[in-house]
Amino acid sequence: MTDSSSPPPPRPWLSRRAFLAGLVATASAACADNDPTAAPSAGDDGTNPEDSTPSTSSPDGADTTSSTTQETTTTSEPAAEELEAPPWDGRVDPFTLGVASGDPLSSSVILWTRLAVDPANGGGMGEDPIDVLWEVAADDTFADVVARGVTAAQPALGHSLHIDADGLDPDTWYSYRFRLGDFVSPVGRTRTFPEPGAPSDFLRIGVSSCQNFEQGFYGAHRHLAAEELDAMVWLGDYIYESGPTEFPIEVGDLVRVHDGPEVADVVDYRNRYALYRGDADIQMNHAAQPWIVTWDDHEVDNDYADEISELNDPPAEFLDRRAAGYQAWYEHMPVRLGPPTGPDLVIYRDLVWGDLAQIFVLDGRQFRDNQPTDGELIPFPGVG
């Protein structure tokens, strides 16, 4: 574990202005496959840079909050209380999809896992809630546990967990894990952010997006996990929804193929996420530091815009598919959000790092107009 009070390793230094300008430029460049004219929708979300709690505002201007938590989320219990791992009669490791953390504040962070003994076929965990023990420690041996609790993983949410582990110290690294019966999850490493306004000279982030399973292996995740980052920012297209060999290939050949046809319902989406989350390099990067996540189009359907699908399906039909995609996205992401209700989920929010940075998480799909083309290039006047 890295002591948050230790100085960072030597690195090229940027001025604060240059760093923030680069961060904004990078965050605005989430990819839109086959649609070079598309751009994320953005607006004034009314947040206060000094408020460390991610906040949102609805399209009609009414304030909402993204700190609403699902029914399986709990806050920290006293670390001194000894808790045993809940009994479980399963004989197969339920932590096949690894662990993750995300949306860190100065005193809390979301901890994630999803139980799945048969991840490629819906999860295989049955129809009952399953109690799971979670622990946060100041060391990677868990000799100094600072927060723990028992939370039920609900079948309606794919037996996923979103734990709001609070009461933590600001600007501090922690280890975390989950336990069920005789099984212990991989150990994850996470951190809290500095308090809003606290002096801060540096922030180390990784930024990535667009990981089509068929078009490449995930060695970049392995290298990012080794970079000693403070946070990983994901700009969308965590999965691709297409069937085997269906998505256009522009460079090179397929290195592997999707394991089923184009996804359309919640079980299909869950299985597609399980395919991606089963990759060892992705699991390594998720376990290395907290993630800040948004979506783009392929989490549901290529080039969709609000209720308009790529192939102009009837809106009511497409909204059912969007609801399935949003639910599976929520079930697999360590986000400080409540679960979606039908085809709607407000995900735009912001997080504050000391006095150095405010990170705005945008939604470039749910509140946008349709793109003016079907993906073909439109030449600019005077440009050959």
Image (tube, rainbow, N blue to C red):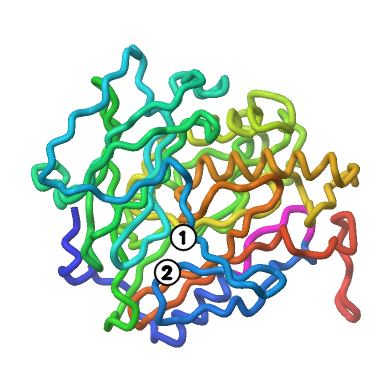
Figure disc tally: 2
- Classify mark 1: residues with Cα within 10 Å, few (<14), some (14-19) or many (20+): some
Q: Badges 1 and 2: C-beta atoms under 8 Å apart?
A: yes
Prevalent SS, magenta region: loop
- Between disc 1 and disc 2, whose residue precedes? 2
Tell me the amino acid under the disc marked 1. Answer: Ser
Badge 2 element: loop
Left or right side of 22 for 92: left
Tell me the amino acid under the disc marked 2. Answer: Thr
- Classify mark 2: residues with Cα within 10 Å, few (<14), some (14-19) or many (20+): many
Determine whether 140 is above or below 31 in the image: above
Quadrant of residue 240 within the rendered picture = top right
Say if the magenta span includes residue 32.
Answer: yes
Left or right side of 9 for 333: right
Say if the magenta span includes residue 55.
Answer: no
Q: Distance between the residues labelled 1 and 2?
A: 7 Å
Badge 1 element: loop
Residue visible at 45% across and 76% down in the picture: 358
**Residue 92 visible from this viewpoint:** yes
Which is nearer the eye, 28 or 53?
A: 53
Determine whether 5 is above or below 150 in the image: below
Determine whether 136 is above or below 23 in the image: above
Which is nearer the eye, 97 or 12?
A: 97
Which is nearer the eye, 353 or 231?
A: 353
Left or right side of 302 for 282: left
Coordinates of residue 134 in the picture (x, y in percent) = 28, 39
Left or right side of 88 for 211: right
Disc 1: which residue: 67
Span of residues in magenta: 28-35
Q: Residue 332 carries which label?
A: none
Residue visible at 91% across and 79% down in the picture: 381
Disc 2: which residue: 53
